[in-house]
Amino acid sequence: MRSKLPNVGVTIFTEMSQLALAHHAINLGQGFPDYNPDALLMQCVSDAMLAGHNQYAPMAGVPTLREAVAEKVARLQGQEYDPGDEITITSGATEALASAMIALIHVGDEVILIDPSYDLYAPVVRLAGGITVRVPMTPPTARTKRFTIDWSALEAAIGPRTRMIVLNFPNNPTGTILGDGDLERLEKITQQHNVLLLSDEAYEHIVFDGEPHRSLASRPALADKTIVVSSFGKTFHATGWKIGYFCAPKALTAEIRKIHQFIVFSVPTPIQHGVAAYMRQHARLDQLPAFYQQKRDRLKAGLEGSAFRPLDSQGTFFLLVDTSALGNLKEKDLAQRLTIEHGVGTIPVSAFYEDPDDPSANHRLLRLCFAKQDQTLDRAVEALRAVRGVGA
Ligand code: PMP
Ligand code: GLN
């Protein structure tokens, strides 16, 4: 069969989850919580079902949910989106990202990805007929302890055929967030070049140490050319509900909705009503950073002095650990052996690069997900602290 994506297999998240399951390992790989959403949220969704909200939702989403998103974005980012024609509810951030790419990338357009980059971007750009241009982030050093964005390299990658830059901050897998200086730099760059920005802000509500989330929507000059994508699954501990949204200026929204309406048409009605009702409780959203910061700190403190040296995580529910103490294995081989021999599943950061086998993609780093109950984190810490070496 002639494949449209000949080099794509199952995702690293599926692969590592299956391996963890097969070996009864603690799964700190694929990013999902091992606890339930808030009972009130589940109540809101079942109330909506029982109240009869069980048929097709409007294509763009239930109006009360779009209004709740508009209010939230205005409250937190100061940007007014019209819920009528600038906010759309999607089947997770995944569908929003894919619909935006399919709608806006034309054959031969160049799309800049910042590596390490989330696994769906490159294949969907290719499906849309686009060409990826990959710009690496600067890897951590003993001093920086986190990946940083190389804005000069990004600007140098922009050419006459560049149609779009994909950004993802808070960043999966690195945990890096945007500072004010980053937004200023991006604003300057995009004043010089006519490009669209696709901003994957799936982890917008998980930012630590008192920092705000700086959405691209917070600056009008950027918002004008940006599609902001988010995920309720991440925000509300309900990754299995597959519900998200995007905000974009009217003309962009109209084009993306043309794809959305033929891929899913609309997303589950009772979940939309339930999330809308739940979103009236601002305080619960505002507690999220503290909830996850405690987990980050627990995992980080637990691993200090072990063979897994934690880097800094400014946001998301991921922590990178440096595994240099365990030798020079490729990250993926190390992740597999850790799962099989030591009972802890992780994700190799190399999977977020174009060629995971290339030495330039292997920084001896693994990604750990800390969206786990404290006891799960403690068990993982115990298992990881016992690791002195891998393989024979
Ligand atoms: N973007 C990033 C960076 C993610 O990490 C994820 C999921 N983990 C998604 C998009 C997809 O989000 P959703 O589950 O809402 O489709
Ligand atoms: N985004 C999740 C992660 O990074 C995985 C989602 C998926 O399995 N597609 O782990």
Image (cartoon, rainbow, N blue to C red):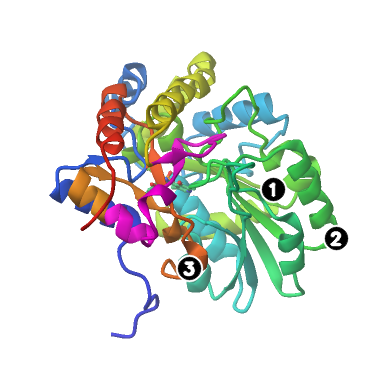
Q: Residue 178: image x %, image y %? A: 67, 40
Q: Secondary structure at mark 3?
A: helix
Q: Give the alpha-carbon distance from disc 3 to disc 1, as whole Å.
A: 41 Å
Q: Residue 357 sits in which quadrant?
A: bottom left
Quadrant holding the C terminus: bottom left
Q: Residue 348: image x %, image y %? A: 39, 54
Q: Residue 309 sits in which quadrant?
A: top left
| Residue at x 28%, y 44% (from the top left corner) | 388
Residue 359 numbered mark, or none: 3
Residue type at mark 3 is Pro
| Residue at x 36%, y 22% (from the top left corner) | 41
Q: In this rendering, is residue 218 above or below 114?
A: above
Q: Which stretch is magenta?
A: 308-336
| Residue at x 31%, y 23% (from the top left corner) | 374
Q: Secondary structure at mark 1?
A: loop
The residue carrying mark 1 is: 249
Q: In this rendering, is residue 189 above or below 145?
A: below
Residue 192 numbered mark, or none: 2
Residue type at mark 2 is Gln
In the image, residue 370 lies in the stretch drawn in magenta = no
Among numbered discs 2 and 1, the one appearing first in the sequence = 2
Q: Is residue 7 visible?
A: yes
Q: Nearer the viewer, residue 186 or 326?
A: 326
